[in-house]
C-alpha cells in the first residue's frame, strides 16, 4: 500500500504532466492554425497531417517542460 505522501506526489506528477501536455497541444494548435495547418480538418490532406504532427510535438514538449519544472522545483526544496 502506498503512503499518502507518495500518492500525493504521484497525483501531482500526473496532473502536471497532463497540464503540460494540454498546454503544449493548445499552443501547437494555435501556431499551426497561424501557419495554415489544421489537425481537425476533414480528410487526410497536408494541412491535417501537418497539424497532427505539430500537435504531437507540442504535447511532447509540454510534458518535457513540466518534468523539468518539477525537477527544478524539487532541487530547490
Image (cartoon, rainbow, N blue to C red):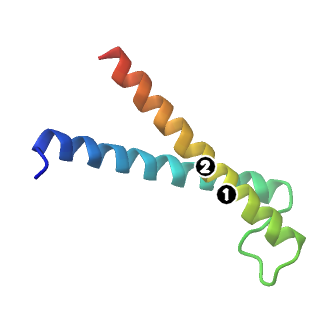
> Residue at the front extreme?
1
Q: CA distance from mark 2 to mark 1?
A: 6 Å
How far from the left and from the top, in percent, is residue 48?
80, 71
Which residue position holds label 1? 56
How crowded is the residue under tag 1: few (<14 C-alpha within 10 Å), some, or many (20+)? some
Percent of width and height locating residue 46: 89, 70
Any part of residue 60 in sight: yes
Q: Quadrant of the C terminus?
A: top left
Residue at 73 percent of width and 69 percent of height: 39
Q: Which mark is residue 60?
A: 2
Q: Nearer the viewer, residue 21 or 30?
A: 21
Tell me the element at label 1: helix
Q: For the image shown, how many numbered marks are present on the structure?
A: 2
Q: Residue at x 85, y 55 (%)?
A: 35
As rendered, which of 2 and 27 lies closer to the eye? 2
Look at the numbered discs 2 and 1 and tell me whether their residues touch, using CB distance below 8 Å: yes
Could you say which is closer to the camera, residue 22 or residue 61?
61
Amino acid at each position: 500500500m502506498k503512503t499518502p505522501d507518495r500518492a500525493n506526489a504521484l497525483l501531482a506528477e500526473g496532473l502536471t504532466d497532463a497540464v503540460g501536455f494540454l498546454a503544449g497541444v493548445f499552443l501547437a494548435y494555435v501556431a499551426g492554425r497561424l501557419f495554415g495547418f489544421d489537425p481537425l480538418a476533414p480528410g487526410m490532406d497536408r494541412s491535417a497531417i501537418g497539424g497532427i504532427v505539430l500537435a504531437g510535438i507540442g504535447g511532447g514538449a509540454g510534458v518535457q517542460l513540466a518534468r523539468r519544472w518539477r525537477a527544478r522545483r524539487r532541487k530547490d526544496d
